[in-house]
Each structure stands twice: as C-alpha cells, then as structure tokens.
Image (cartoon, rainbow, N blue to C red):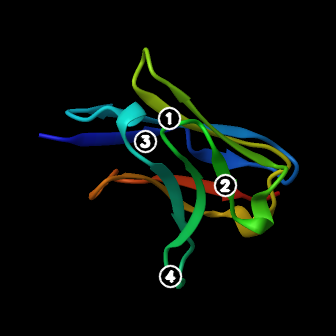
Amino acid sequence: QVQLVESGGGLVQPGGSLRLSCAASGILFRDYLTEWYRQAPGKAREWVAQMFTGGITYYKDSVKGRFTISRDNAQNTVSLQMNSLKPEDTAVYYCHVSTYWGQGTQVTVSS
C-alpha cells in the first residue's frame, strides 16, 4: 500500500522560507516523476514543480528562482524548499507521484 505524508507547512511572514517534505512508503520516488501541487482557497489545484527520475526539474513560472525541488533517494523523500515566500503562495501543498497523492500540508504566508 502506497502512502505519501507531507510535512513542514506552517505560518511564515512574507519573504520567509519553509521546507516541505514528502515521505513515501510502498513506492520509490527515484523510479517515478514526482511533483508538487498546491491549492489555494476557492481555486483549482495547480502544478508547482516536478522532478524527473534523472533529476531534471521544472517549475511553475511564478515560483521559478524561489522554489527548489529535491529528492533524497536514501531516505525516499522529496522536498520543496520555498524561499522569498509571498502571500499568493498561501495554499495547501500536495506531493504527487504516479496516481498517488499525499494529504497535503498548509502553507500560510502572512504578516
């Protein structure tokens, strides 16, 4: 049974940083395209970042240069380092791999 568990969300002031992590059981991140999505209140879920098995990464334009996706094969985790956070980054962030989703972690950027 596959389980994805996100952690690391919280409340941060504009300009601050957070690091989200997604831990997996029952599936190896290194074997799949892994993605982060987010969903703000009243909006559709949107793609944020992805990492291919070979390590190539892509980002949504609005987060490029501020967010970094990474993978730890030994720990079987995927992380999203988020810097220079803005109020518009406020959302529930989800880890996605294959057909599986985590439960999400809330990120709130507010002064």
Q: Nearer the viewer, residue 11 or 18?
A: 18
Label 2 or label 3, whichever lies nearer to me, is 2
Q: Looking at the figure, which quarter contains the C terminus?
A: bottom right
Residue bearing mark 1? 78
Residue at left 54%, top 83%? Answer: 43
Residue bearing mark 2? 58
At label 4, the amino acid type is: Ala
Q: Residue furthest front?
A: 54
At label 2, the amino acid type is: Tyr
The quadrant holding residue 9 is top right
Q: CA distance from mark 3 to mark 4?
A: 19 Å
Residue bearing mark 3? 6
Q: CA distance from mark 2 to mark 3?
A: 20 Å
Q: CA distance from mark 2 to mark 4?
A: 20 Å
The reply to whether callout 1 and callout 2 are in contact (CB within 8 Å) is no
Q: Looking at the figure, which quarter contains the N terminus?
A: top left
Tag shown at residue 44: 4
At label 3, the amino acid type is: Glu
Please give the count of numbered marks on the rendered protein.
4
Q: Earlier in the sequence, mark 2 or mark 4?
A: 4
Q: Earlier in the sequence, mark 4 or mark 1?
A: 4
Classify mark 4: helix, strand or loop: loop
User: Does 45 sit left or right of 65 as displayed?
Assistant: left
Q: Earlier in the sequence, mark 1 or mark 2?
A: 2
Label 3 or label 1, whichever lies nearer to me, is 1
Task: Classify 10 Å Cα crowding around label 3: few (below 14), some (14-19), many (20 and above).
Answer: many
Q: CA distance from mark 4 to mark 1?
A: 23 Å
Q: CA distance from mark 1 to mark 2?
A: 14 Å
